[in-house]
Amino acid sequence: MSKRNPEYDFVWCPGCGDFGVRRALEFALQDYITEHEKPHSHNVIVAGIGCSGNMVHLIEGDQPFGIHGIHGRTLPIALGIKSSRPDLNTVIVAGDGDFLSIGAEHIGPAAQRNLDVTCVIMDNGVYGLTKGQSSPTSDIGMITTSTPHGKIEVPVSPLNHYLTVGVSYIASYYSSKPKILAKFIKEAMDHRGFSIVHVQSPCTTYNDTYDLLKGKPREGIPGLAWDIPDDHDPNDLSCALNLIQKPGIPLGLIYKMEGKTLEDRQQEIRNKVSEKTVESTLSEYLI
Amino acid sequence: MQKKDFVIRFAGEGGQGLVTSADALARAATSAGYFTQTFSTFPSQIMGGPASSQVRISTSPVLSSGDGVDVLVALNQYAYDHHEQDLVENGVTIYNAEEYTLPDGGNYFGIKADEIAKSTGNARAANMVTIGAVANLIDFSLTEVDNFIKKRFNRGRDNDSEIIRANIQSVRLGAEVASQSGFSVGKLDNPVKPDYEQIMVTGNSAISLGALSAGLDYYVGYPISPATTILVWMENNLIGSNKFAYQVSSEIESINAIIGAGYAGKKAMTATAGPGIALMSEGLGLAWMAEIPLVVVDVQRGGPATGLPTKSEQSDLFACMHPAHGDVKIPILAPGSVEECFYAAALAVNWAERYQGPVILMSEMAQADRGENIPKPNLDKIKVESRNVYSGDNGFKRYQSWDGTNELTPMPIPGGSGAYVANGSEHDEIGDTTHLPIHHIRLTERRFNKLKLLDGAHYEIENENSQLIISPWGSSKGPSREAYERLLDDNYDIGWIYSVALNPIPEEVFEALKKSKCVLVPELNYQGQWSSLLRQDGIKAQSIIKYDGTPFKPGELVKEITNIFDTVRKK
């Protein structure tokens, strides 16, 4: 159930990382609307399938538009929205299963287009909604319901993948600090081009990584997550590639490159080729 | 001998200018006032391979590519060997004497088109030598050919007049060779020049033009034979502010991108062939479920899998009407001529807007790339419908129950009021996911009730009380109509029922079919797909099937149908 719709029959498990991501997204959407002086209806959320996709029904307060489509196809749907309505702030919410498994074929083309949309990817390293199967980011050897003898593939490195296919804004963070996460999501919305904020969002039921991410500082156990040093140059691709070779989960902005977007290049064509009316096109076929 | 129509076929290898020759002859004939239809067949490769292109020229609108060939231009031995059996009695072959020879005594003569063209100073005019020879055989006015040449090569360049001179001379020299051969296949009746403006257009261009005339904003596509020409057309013509035409990376991207554009308020379309329909099926289900207006064009080819990419078949009907899992029945328009392609495409865009959902327009290989001269559509008379956009307060319930008795609830558009979630999961009135039985019941009914909004497609009902009814669909209309008219002339007790809309079937058409004792459905597939769907609705239908990758010939149908009459009589 959600605050605005008591009948809505979906809930996240207690402690789910997606609660923090939702809070961050709400902050970012509000900031975007306030700063750009647009109504909330200019925000469009494109949701994938899975626990994270239900985000689109759970936003509290002023409502954005939303589309909750089919598994793995958030990027092509967002392509249709953004390329036909560049005025809309188009944001994808999807999980590691939806985005990096069934939907992975769309990341490369979206990067090559530099499609001006923002992806908020909630990575919990497991298929939660279908009750605990291995996902592209599950570790090798991990025991899940679909890998009872241990997972036999190495996990995908999402950040490495994004960098090498040419995504033009990449940030990595976790769900535990929504205010800071919101800052990166808002920055990604403002970035002109294809942006991904990859968020570690633990699944408390099937893959609880909270302790792993933060470590136990009092006991001297370091966490997997580490802050990106201040001297990192996010405008330099080789620096970014070097940075992410370090084990664990970097927190912060990894890469950002300004460049022409799909909309820019489409506009260049419109400026170059004169507009045609249907009547003039039809007349080209006159006998 | 005066004749009503002629079929002239150019056969050889792909890349030899076969299509150019047939097209040039068609354009010269249409300029003179004749009706024409071209038809080409070629293998799935870039260059070479056996190919042919033909034109049928007539004093009345051409319904099909005809039965036999009157003049065959065979550019190599293989072409002669494989097309010679299609010649009508007394048909004549012009063979390429630079390539091969045929023994004396047949209905043929050789021509050295390259050598003759070179002698005029323009080696590229060889096809005009052949066209001159053909014109002589059918006694077609050389002056009309000259007029066509003057029009085509008047391109504002310095050497225009030299090119025109050489081409005209090539035509004369070709005609001279034919004249010396002593052959003739008859004389075309004089044309009755139409008193209206005409365009010469292919089926795929007509679909593109029709969609634009209804206000299409957005097109994406992925290359696939025989639908690629629509993508290419859109890239060249769907241009302007707020217009978008773009090649995406798969058919899965195509369908989902037009779902995004349709959701965002645009009139959006894609075109594909059978393999693309297969990939789009889940997306079509989403568009049906979330109620997103969009149009998918399926230019059918032989299937399944990669099948016959450049051949004719009408075998996607099951896949188009029920593409997705679950309770779905997608509206289908299946035009049966180049002219119908134009109007059906405009109606498909209107239907999508009117009922807020996906519409499939089905064409077919044989109709896609063939050229026809048709009356120029009057754009002022094209009805342009746009969806009813919501503009009230927020908190709107888009997915209310709807039984078809009042106006369909309007659709909110992002940026405007009434924010909701367009949801592919079953949902409540504001679009939130729900599993409650009441919502699945009322929204399933709503989605099917919306089909009642879809009317206005072209249909034809004639002699519906006859013993047998011929009732084709899509591109089999032309040859079926020609067969029907021949059978009527021979006093057979035969009727005609035809509808561009296959789902929903117009009520008048459905009633007429239902009353018929025997409905014969010519269709290009093995299973008899349309007749089996008609039988589901209690109509006494049976198919006349063909599945060799080529369209029906009218003569084949006449033979089949007269056989059926004989069987019925004997009973």
Image (cartoon, coloured by chain):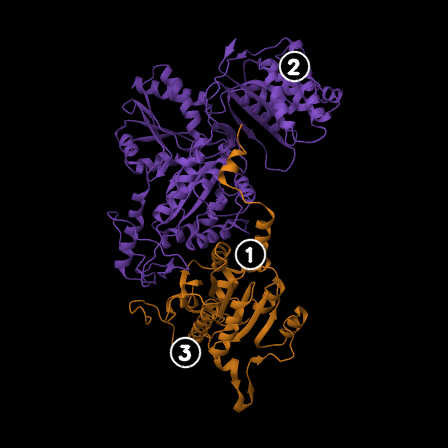
Chain colours: A orange, B purple
Instruction: Please provide percent x and percent y for residue A8.
Output: 32, 67
Query: At 53% from the left edge and 50% from the top edge, which residue is drawn?
Result: B250
Q: Quadrant of residue B7?
A: top right
- Secondary structure of the residue carrying numbered label 1: helix
Instruction: Please provide percent x and percent y for residue A42.
Output: 43, 63
Vertical placement of B415 versus A15: above or below?
A: above
Q: Are marks 2 and 3 on the same chain?
A: no
Instruction: Please provide percent x and percent y for residue B114.
Output: 72, 22
Instruction: Please provide percent x and percent y for residue A116.
Output: 54, 61
From the viewer's perspective, is B502 left or right of B130?
Answer: left
Vertical placement of A232 versus B8: above or below?
A: below
Chain under numbered label 3: A
Which mark is first along the chain, 1 or 3?
Answer: 3
Is disc 2 surrounded by few (<14), some (14 to 19) or many (20+) residues within 10 Å?
A: many
Q: Which mark is residue A90?
A: none
The residue pinned by badge 1 equals A263
Chain under numbered label 1: A
The residue pinned by badge 2 equals B175
Is disc 3 surrounded by few (<14), some (14 to 19) or many (20+) residues within 10 Å?
A: some
Vertical placement of B291 versus B82: above or below?
A: below
Q: Amino acid at mark 2?
A: Ala
Tell me how far mark 1 sits from mark 2, CA to CA. 56 Å
